[in-house]
Image: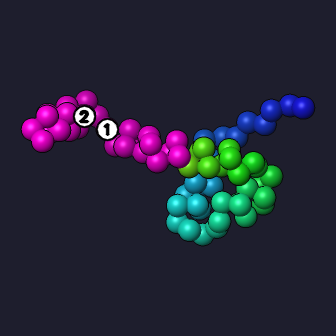
Amino acid sequence: MTRRTYSPRFKADLILELIQNKSKLSELAKKHAIAPTILSRWKNDFIKKKLVFFETKNTVRRYTIHEDVL
């Protein structure tokens, strides 16, 4: 059995559909023949890493300094 690979765009489209509550995880997984656990992992990875999209050296530095003050 060969492993399927999915483009980042495809993963992002599915995750956005989940986050916007347009589809349930189980329905979306079935529709695209993807294991629900894989789709769930993609969603969790996105949620954990979403801030990286907006980060630059300056914003990370400011956040770190602000965090130290708290």
Q: Is residue 58 visible?
A: no
Q: Does the magenta run of residues contain 68?
A: yes
Rendered residue at 76%/49% (across/down): 34
Q: CA distance from mark 1 to mark 2?
A: 6 Å
Residue 62 place in picture, x, y as percent: 17, 36
Please name the predominant secondary structure of the magenta segment in the image. Answer: helix
Residue 49 place in picture, x, y as percent: 44, 40
Label 2, residues with CA under 10 Å away: few <14, some 14-19, many ≥20: some
Q: Does the magenta run of residues contain 56?
A: yes
**In the rendered image, which quarter is residue 66 located in?**
top left
Q: Is residue 67 visible?
A: yes
Q: Secondary structure at mark 1?
A: loop
Q: Which residue is mark 2?
A: 60
- Which label is found at residue 55? 1
Rendered residue at 56%/68% (across/down): 21
**In the rendered image, which quarter is residue 5 located in?**
top right
Residue 45 place in picture, x, y as percent: 52, 42
Segment tinted magenta in the rendering:
44-70
Q: Mark 1 or mark 2, which has the lower sequence index?
A: 1
Q: Marks 1 and 2: CB-CB under 8 Å?
A: yes
Seen as rendered, the residue at the extreme bottom is 22
Amino acid at the residue labelled 2: Val
